Every structure is written in C-alpha cells, then in structure tokens.
Image (spheres, rainbow, N blue to C red):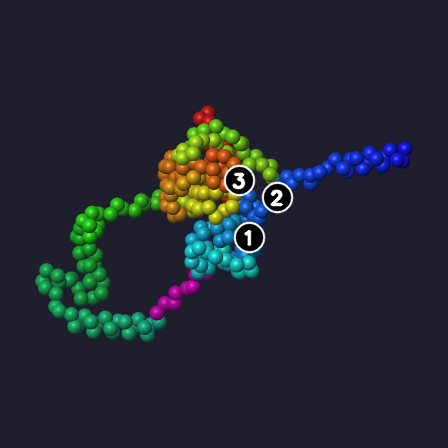
Amino acid sequence: MTLLASMVVLTGCAQRTEPAPVTRLYQGKTIHDFEPASLTGDSYVVEAGDTLYSIAFRANEDVRTLAQWNRLNAPYTIQPGQKLRISAPPVTPVSTPTSTSRSTQTRSTTVVKKSTPTPSASQNVASTSGKGYGEQKVKENKKQPARVQAPSSSGQISPPTRAEPPLPASKDIVWQWPATGKVLREFSSAETGSKGLDIAGTRGAPIYAAAAGKVVYAGNALKGYGQLIILKHNDDYITAYAHNQQLLVKEQQWVNKGEQIAAMGDTDAERVKLHFQVRFRGKSVNPRHYLPRGTQ
C-alpha cells in the first residue's frame, strides 16, 4: 500500500509541466488606482509612478493651474520626494499708500496740471477741482462710440473668442448620451467593477459632450484610459470620455451639450468603444441615472 501511494503522488507531480496561471500582472499605477478629489491639504509629496496629471486628477484641480502654483513648465517633469503645492497659495495683502505718499502724489499732480495747456471753451469743465474733472470725463466717455475690432494685417477680422457662460446649478444641467451604440458593460459599484458605461461603436464614430462644460483635461497621460477627455460641468459634476482615437478639443475650451469632442477609438482598450463616466463630487455614479431613458 505504501508503494502504491508513493507511485500515485509521483505520477501527479510529473503531470504538471506548466507553471500556475497568473491572473493579473501588476504593471504600475493606472487611473484605476486613483480617485478624484482624494487629495486634501496644501501640499503633496510625489511618489514613484506619479505624474502631474494624476496628482491634478486626485486634487480636483486643473493641471495647468497646478503647474503654475509650482512653477513647472511643460512637459511637467516631477521627481519622487518632490513636494508640490496642491491648493491655492495664500494671497499677499497689498499695502495701502501712507498719507505722506498721498501728499506727494497730490503735489506731483498739481505741478503737472499747471504745466498743461489751458483747455479750450468746448473742453472747459465746470470746476477745476478733481471732482468736477472726473465728472466731466465720465460725461465725455459716455459719448464715445463702442470699440470695433480692428482688422488684422491680412485685412480680415479674427473671429471672437467664444464667451464662457457661468456654470449651471446641478438641477439645471441638461444631459444627453455621448455616443450612439449598444452598451457593452454596465456601471457597477463593486470595488473591481466598471466605474462607468462601455458603449460600442465604429472607429471614428463621433463622441459628443453629454452636457455643456469646460475641458479640464485632454490627453493620454492617465494610464489605462488612452486618449481621454474630462469635462467639468460645475463644482459637483465632471464627465470622462476614454479610449478615443482623436481628440477634437483642447484644455480650457468651453463646449456645448451635443458638440462633438472626439472620435471613437480603442487606445488602451481591447476593442473600439467609449468608456463614459459621470462623477459627483469625485465619486463615480451610474450614468444611467442622468442620461435620457429609452434611447439606448
């Protein structure tokens, strides 16, 4: 019996010719390791694998603003152990001029007035005091015609910059689907579940802004999401559009609801699709709670 048991054990060991399967290989931090608005305080010490984009994402700040606070130039290179400011620096109060300085300025102004030519009758003011002069200036300015934009050297007037409207209240945001196609994967609140919707489509299909807002991120520095766009709709809501083939907007640009912002692709994805997220105060929420029902 002992000999038989030994033979069974040896046979079992001999049959395994391949190593145990590896279900997941760690390749460093990705966007899945980060949560927006998860960093608080005034400063943050850079860790291995961090980028300024990922820190800005977690600090809920625009990457350009973060770079300005820390005097960083593109491509925003940072090093482990480096201390970065992640909140607005304190405002230095502006000192007011002393009474002596004001007296000096008054005397200087008086000298200049004496040296100027006497105004003509049509330009004469009601009073030589500062108050009367100011009132006359206001009246004259009101008569001035509106300024017209001067043409460029080529003779054409450049188009005006699109005005940025105030961010709407949460209840006033109007939503629409960001793409047309079958939903491949639903939102899940599980720790390892999808934090948004995966929407199928063809390569180059249009991706639309789900609501009006400002582009606060457009790039591919966040590993795992490929060519990514993040829109800020107000202080509560942001939306993310991942795996695009082409980005059609730039950071700080204002877009309207339904405006095309990207072309669908498969960057950092296993197939052509749009991964769409809605985040409320930094936390992922189910997009179906906001998008129109019955359309997809």
Q: Which residue is at a point 10% across and 64% down the rendered structure image?
A: 120
In the displayed orientation, state which residue is furthest to the left.
121
Q: Is residue 105 left or right of residue 186?
A: left
Residue type (three-letter) at the residue carrying disc 3: Ser
Give the label on residue 49, or none: 1
Give the mark toward the camera: 1 or 3.
Answer: 1
Give the label on residue 284, or none: 3
Please name the predominant secondary structure of the magenta segment in the image. Answer: loop
Q: Is the residue under label 3 in contact with that under label 2 (CB below 8 Å)? A: no
In the displayed orientation, state which residue is furthest to the top.
294
Residue type (three-letter) at the residue carrying disc 2: Leu
* Pointer 2 residue: 25
Q: Which residue is at a point 13% across and 63% down the rendered structure image?
A: 124
Dot 1 or dot 3: first in sequence order is 1
Compared to 190, does 150 lie above or below? Answer: below
Query: Where does residue 187 sit, x and y in percent of width and height?
Result: 54, 34
Q: Is residue 87 left or right of residue 212?
A: right
How busy is the neighbourhood of tag 2: few (under 14 within 10 Å), some, or many (20 plus)?
few
Dot 2 or dot 3: first in sequence order is 2
Badge 1 marks a residue whose secondary structure is loop
Range of magenta residues: 90-97
Q: Quadrant of the N terminus?
A: top right
Instruction: Specify whether residue 96 is painted magenta.
Output: yes
> Is residue 28 at least partly visible in the picture?
yes
Q: Which residue is at a point 48% across and 51% down the rendered structure image?
A: 53
- Distance of mark 2 from mark 1, alpha carbons? 16 Å
Compared to 211, does 63 lie above or below? Answer: below
